[in-house]
Every structure is written in C-alpha cells, then in structure tokens.
Amino acid sequence: MPGLALESLDRSSPAIVDLLARIGAPYGWRSASRTEEEWELWFAECPDRTFWLLSFEGAPAGLVTCDLQPGEEVEIRSFGLLPEFVGKGLGGYALTLGILRAWDLAPAVTRVWLHTSTFDHENALPNYHGRGFRTFKTETGDRG
C-alpha cells in the first residue's frame, strides 16, 4: 500500500511505551496501564525483542514487536494500529509487512506465530487468518 512503511525502532526509544499504551487502550491491553517498573521488567524479559514503527504517509501509525524464540521461531509479541488509523484499510498491509520482517529475523526461522484475544479488534482474527495464520488453540478466561 502506498504510503505505508515499516522501519526499525531502537528499543530505547520512549515512543515504544507511548505507542503500545495508545494502541492497547481500547482493548484493555496490559500495556495501557503498566507502571514504570512493569515496563522495565517487560523490556528485560527478552533482550532480543525487536521493534518496528509502522508509519503512514510519514505519521506514526502503529507498532510491530517480535521476540526470537528457541528453535528459530518468532513470536509477534504485539501488533497494532493507533486508534486514529484503525478502520482505514491498513491492518492487512501492515501485518504483512510485519510478518515478512519476522521471517527475516534469523537465518533459519522455522515458524512465525502470535496470540490474539477476543478483547482485540473484531477484525484481528480475520486479518490473521487472511495472512495464513491458523487457530491453534482457543482458551477462555479473563484479561488476567
């Protein structure tokens, strides 16, 4: 999609916390209410966590975060658009860019995967299925 870009974001960027909080607020993500100490723990739990800024026509539009897992697997830890970019037809293109970047994280990536929740945007699961992901397991419970 013209105007949509994905660029590396240094893990020390203060924009990461702001973006994840704003992206997750409508869906009750933990990132919307983490304390400074909780953020420190979150960053420390995976020193290889990578961050990519999604931008549309030069404006920050979202974020993709990936963790390299054992066995050369990559977990898309978080993916989302800022509220002002939701509903503009960017999600599928943005996720495709993130998936392509995830496959390039290591020389021999064997699998790219992610989690979603019924609390996420109603188009999240159809978007994931449309990009080739399949439902592996469904669990019920609260937001934890």
Image (cartoon, rainbow, N blue to C red):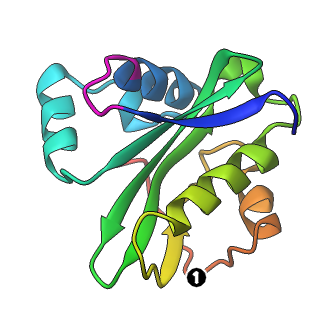
Visible residue check, residue 139: no
Whether residue 135 is visible here, answered yes or no, is yes
* Residue nearer the viewer, 106 or 67: 106
Q: Position of residue 141 (x, y in %)?
A: 45, 60
The residue pinned by badge 1 equals: 136
Q: Nearer the viewer, residue 128 or 1?
A: 1
Check disc 1 and report its element: helix, strand or loop.
Answer: loop
* Residue 48 x, y percent position in the rendering: 25, 54
Q: Using the image as rendered, state which of residue 72 and residue 21 is in the foreground.
A: 72
Residue drawn where x is 43% and y is 23% of the image: 21
Residue at left offset 55%, top offset 80% = 137
Tell me if 53 is positioned left or right of 123 in this view. left
Q: In the picture, residue 83 is in which quadrant?
A: top right
Residue depicted at x 43% and y 65%: 75
Left or right of 140 in this view: 44: left
Please identify the quadrant where the N terminus is shown. Answer: top right
Q: Is residue 19 above or below residue 89?
A: above
Q: Residues within 10 Å of mark 1 (few under 14, many from 20)?
A: few
Q: Main secondary structure of the magenta part?
A: loop
Which stretch did the figure color magenta? 10-15
- Count of numbered circles on the image: 1
Q: Where residue 104 appears, x then y in whole percent?
A: 51, 65
In the rendered structure, which amino acid carries the disc numbered 1? Phe
Q: Is residue 65 left or right of residue 44?
A: right
Identify the residue at image location x=37%, y=47%: 50
Residue at the farthest front position: 107
121 is within the stretch colored magenta: no
